[in-house]
Image (cartoon, grey):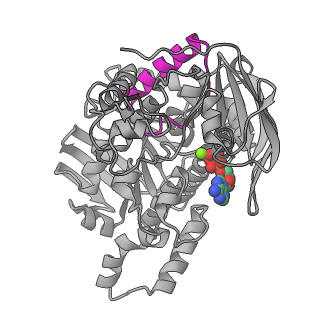
Amino acid sequence: MSVPIDAGGAHELRLEGLGRQFGAVRALDSVDLVLRAGEVHALMGENGAGKSTLIRCLAGLERPDAGRILLDGLPLPSGHPAAVRAAGLRFIHQELHAVRGLSVAENMFLDHPYPRRAGLVNWRAVNRAAQAALSRLGVDDLDPRQPMTGLGPGDQMIARIAGTLIDEGGAPPWLYVMDEPTAALTGAESERLFAVIGEMIAAGAGVLYVSHRMPEVLRLSDRVTVLRDGRHISTRPLGETGQERIIHEMTGRDLSALFPPRDALQHGDTVLGVRGLAAPGIRDVSFDLRAGEILGVVGLAGAGQGALLRALIGAAPRRGMVTLDGQPLSATPAGAWAQGLAYVPPERRSQGLMLGRSITENVALPHLERMARGRFFLNRRQQARRTGDLGAKVRLKAATLSQGCSQLSGGNQQKVLFARALAGAPRVLLLDEPTRGVDIGAKSDLYRLIRQLADDGVAVLLASSDLPEVLGLADRIAVMQEGRLTHLKENSGMTEASLLASFYDSGDAA
Ligand SMILES: Nc1ncnc2c1ncn2[C@@H]1O[C@H](COP(=O)(O)OP(=O)(O)O)[C@@H](O)[C@H]1O
Ligand SMILES: [Mg+2]
């Protein structure tokens, strides 16, 4: 059973001079914008640009303190989510707010009236409608009756997206507003969502789409609006803009300025020597990494990039020879860390950060054991000062260092992990997808930091699926195929296309 979408007419939502102030922060500053049925309108901007505030104002969850919102020329009631829904708007908000103790179906129905029979909630109909909505997203293995809190973040997001697809029988929705819906989704789940967005547009509805992921935006949108510091910078048809222009408008900087300049390739002695390394997912890998060098590691997904880093840090059993400054490298994470090998893992939420703990704790905790062993124990004030110094070095933007890491943006969470790695004054820095899910401003900060560390003599191994990032940062690039290192080249004259081609050809270096 599928849920029909019928947008029912050419509606238009007009934002005029919309403003919202939080203390000293002007989250929205006199924003004008028109949203129409029948098109995907992307809303772009760095973290803190005001996107979610704009969406919460639309939803009636936040009252604007200036301007107005007109639906087909009539004021949309402000501060009344139910009235906004009745006007045909549906929202997928950025924060996950699963209600504990309620089932998946009950969470999906939070904003909807329950189907009833003879005055009683018709639970069979509730679960059937939930199942039908999930099916539209291609999800048939989620039981609508199971508790929502048992689900991972990806499945919770799927359930919330499906919740907007429930047919209430009233006026059909004509505008779907999605705030970073794919942030927690897998590639396949995202594709299902894009297919549903296609159906929405075909049925005449509109979509306001917020995402950091440029390829999604370039693929899905008809028009693109850029916000910066709460201000409306531009709204353009996709054909009149593109990645470079959007980045320029989001940041006020050029794409070429995103990457710090690389000096003439003057590198020091070999810091990390790898010979005949074998481990789960990699075979016979050999290379040298020199002081001051950034070596990019690329390949198709799962070709061994992450496995190589995990083997080096001692997180997986390995054979072969690894040396750091000529000494055999310890095969345990604690030993490798003590020798000066630092690692920033790819999944910061699950592998890296203790989200419930403060910034200071996240930066200092892994070091305390080592400090204690050296009869050198920092007191709280010293810890905080050291964290403050490191925070400044990585350009961390946080209200206080005692702030919990769960409240930070993705970019700032990643900066906390960098600060932790730097607290050990590493000789070698292993980075696995260091800017995934990070906004462009924080990316630029991290790129400058990585180059600065290399200039200070740190040897950097950068595993990344972001090819412009590798081409912009790396001095040399290693390509992996099926666990082997097949190419190792100076980064000059290479393009994304030639790099991609090397993922498939048989290679010439080892
Ligand atoms: N409830 C709030 N209280 C105080 N400041 C807020 C609140 N909501 C948002 N802000 C601030 O408003 C600005 C815009 O935030 P937001 O709309 O979440 O940006 P985006 O979604 O583009 O990342 C940020 O500086 C943010 O810290
Ligand atoms: Mg947001």
Which part of the image, by quadrant, shows the N terminus? top left
Q: Position of residue 90 (x, y in %)?
A: 57, 31
Q: Position of residue 488 (x, y in %)?
A: 39, 35
194 left or right of 24?
Answer: left
Q: Classify 490 as above or below 242.
A: below
Residue in the image at 35% along x and 19% along y = 505
The answer to whether residue 48 is seen in the rendering is no
Q: Residue furthest top?
A: 202
In this rendered view, identify the residue nearer to me: 403 or 383: 403
Residue 196 falls within the magenta-colored stretch:
yes
Q: Classify 395 as above or below 274.
A: below
Residue in the image at 45% along x and 59% along y = 417
In this rendered view, identify the residue nearer to me: 468 or 350: 350
Marks counted in the figure total 0
Which part of the image, by quadrant, shows the C terminus? top left
The answer to whether residue 438 is seen in the rendering is yes
In this rendered view, identify the residue nearer to me: 228 or 62: 62
406 left or right of 58?
Answer: left
Residue 189 falls within the magenta-colored stretch:
yes
Residue 329 placement: quadrant: bottom left
Residue 401 placement: quadrant: bottom right
Q: Residue furthest front?
A: 118
Residue 501 placement: quadrant: top left
Q: Position of residue 429 (x, y in %)?
A: 41, 56
Q: Position of residue 418 (x, y in %)?
A: 47, 59
Residue in the image at 56% along x and 13% along y = 6
Magenta span: 179-207
